[in-house]
Image (spheres, grey):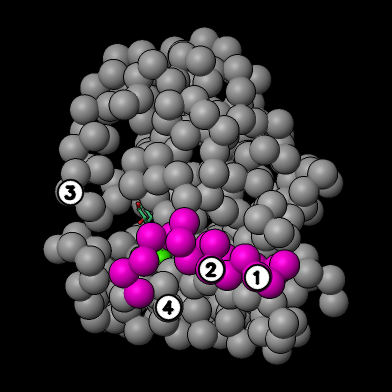
Amino acid sequence: MSYLETACSAAKQAGTMILSQMGTGQAAEKKSSRFDVVTEIDKRAEEMIRSIILESYPDHAFLGEEETFGSGKPVEQILKERSDRPYLWIVDPIDGTANFIHGIPGYTVSIALLCRGELRLGVIYDPCRDDLYWAESGKGAFCNGKPAAVTDAEQAEDCVIGTGFVSTPAYREMNIATMEAIGREFRTIRSLGSAALTLAYVACGKLDAFWEYGLSAWDVAAGVLLVEESGGMVTNTKGDPFRLWDRNIAASNAKVHSTLLPCLV
Ligand code: IPD
Ligand code: CA
Ligand code: CA
Ligand code: CA
């Protein structure tokens, strides 16, 4: 199997398991803050994906959200520590745990592969809708096998902008302030509850742009490649080229990027 086939298979297997557990009253355990929660299903899904990937590629490195939590290390440091092996998989087993817990459709499995620090592929699976998104570096982005393309909207009043609320209170304050500016400028705002799904929606032209403060590499790695490969633009919220340890992200159809950035902090 190719790397892409392995990633798609792992995302679908984990997504099917997660969907089968929706609505079964999974207990929400607190993590880093009072807003940050995890369930046994997040951990089970990460273990499933890890074993599928490492059985196929035992010499590759693996970075999963749930395993990383507790190390207390910044992601930049972990990425550097694991850079001795050329291939690194970055996985968010459930992106949108709050949606999963509340029974709201709209959570994803997000899997990215880096080769020597560069994004090589990204796969995002939405099990509630059975939608599979993938991108390979230099080969484009796809939704359920069809080529994905960003919108061509140029005017702010024609644009729907996605965002999300992280669990860290200081980043949430930044977002609340930004919503005022975006709400005045653009057609409307949507908070889907999964950063990966939101980036996939920018890539396939459902949303025109996305911003969020305080994200981590596993939230965005696959989605960044999807947006770039579908003709969009991804930067940090200052407008610099996006690096995976950047916490603040701005992604768009490229055409509205310069209207989006001045609204961000
Ligand atoms: C969260 C989701 C959410 C975003 C949060 C993330 P999790 O990830 O992506 O949309 O707003 O910032 O932490 O915790 O459900 O994997
Ligand atoms: Ca989480
Ligand atoms: Ca996440
Ligand atoms: Ca997660």
Q: Is residue 66 left or right of residue 196?
A: left
For the residue carrying disc 3, how many other residues have a C-alpha within 10 Å: few (<14), some (14-19), or many (20+)?
Answer: some
Q: Which residue is mark 4?
A: 67
Provide the secondary structure element on which disc 1 rests. Answer: helix
Q: Is residue 97 left or right of residue 249?
A: left
Give the amino acid type for the residue marked by disc 2 in the picture. Glu
Q: CA distance from mark 1 to mark 4?
A: 19 Å
> Which quadrant holds residue 91?
bottom right
Residue behind label 2 places its C-beta within 8 angstroms of ligand 3: no
Q: CA distance from mark 2 to mark 4?
A: 15 Å
Ligand 1 falls in which quarter? bottom left
Q: Which residue is mark 3?
A: 169
- In magenta, the rendered stretch is 71-93
For the residue carrying disc 4, how many other residues have a C-alpha within 10 Å: few (<14), some (14-19), or many (20+)?
Answer: few
Q: Does 54 sit above or below residue 106?
A: below
- Residue 159: x and y in percent read 48, 21
Select label 1 or label 4 by which is in front.
Answer: 1
Comes first in the chain, label 2 or label 4: 4
Give the amino acid type for the residue marked by disc 1 in the picture. Asp
Select label 2 or label 4 by which is in front.
Answer: 2
- Residue 230: x and y in percent read 71, 37
Provide the secondary structure element on which disc 3 rests. Answer: helix
Q: Which residue is mark 1?
A: 84
Contact between labelled residues 4 and 2, with CB atoms less than 8 Å apart? no
Residue behind label 4 places its C-beta within 8 angstroms of ligand 4: no
> Quick one: quadrant of the N terminus?
bottom right
Q: CA distance from mark 2 to mark 1?
A: 7 Å
Contact between labelled residues 1 and 2, with CB atoms less than 8 Å apart? yes
Comes first in the chain, label 1 or label 4: 4
